[in-house]
Amino acid sequence: MSDAINGYAQAMLAVAQADGNLDVVKSEMSAVAQAVAGNDELRTSLANKLLPAALRGQIVDDILANKGSDTTRALVGMIVSAGRGGEFAEITQSFIAQAASGAGRSVATVRTAVPLSDDQQSRLVAALKQSTGSDVELQVVLDPSVLGGAVTTFGDTVIDGSLRTRLNKMRDSI
């Protein structure tokens, strides 16, 4: 990742830690990143540097009005107003990774079509911890393109247990 992305992530981490609500901000930033990634029009608007920063900021204010913590709203506004809306997902991922690293954990991202239950998340964390030997923080991303199953990314390792991949393997073997 670029130095700029990591710099924004470090600034976000410092602000969230100073406010004492790091876990809340991580969760909310992840949700906002998913919402932005899932809406082409919103993503394009927030990334459009031709729109005045005030207008991009107003879009954020309108979307996040009375939602999330003050810290999250301020951080999202800072990123978008600075013209980094196109890198929002990467900045958020770096922020979450830096926060986990500071706590002595690694981040595993799991993409599923439906939300995972607490039990499923706990079992996945336990399995990843057993196979890697390190503490794991799970980031769940809802991705309808997965169809069924899950795709887990842990560092450079991808474990693709999605229905789409299994069907493609079956088709290839036939």
Image (cartoon, helix red, strand yellow):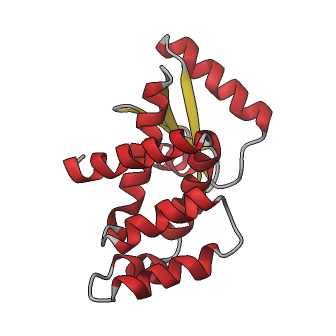
- What residue is at 56 percent from the left and 65 percent from the top? 73
Image position of 127 with respect to 82: above or below: above
Q: Is residue 120 visible?
A: yes
Q: Position of residue 104 (x, y in %)?
A: 48, 19
Left or right position of 22 against 53? right
Q: Position of residue 23 (x, y in %)?
A: 62, 40
Left or right position of 11 against 31? left
Give residue 87's quadrant in the image: bottom left
Q: Position of residue 58 (x, y in %)?
A: 50, 84
- What residue is at 38 percent from the left and 31 percent from the top? 155
- What residue is at 51 percent from the left and 14 percent from the top? 131
Q: Is residue 110 visible?
A: no
Residue sitting nearer the eye, 151 or 32: 32
Q: Position of residue 103 (x, y in %)?
A: 50, 24
Residue sitting nearer the eye, 43 or 60: 60
Image position of 93 with respect to 65: above or below: above
Q: Residue furthest front?
A: 18
Residue sitting nearer the eye, 87 or 79: 79
Left or right position of 45 against 18? left
Image position of 172 with respect to 44: above or below: above
- What residue is at 43 percent from the left and 42 percent from the top? 14
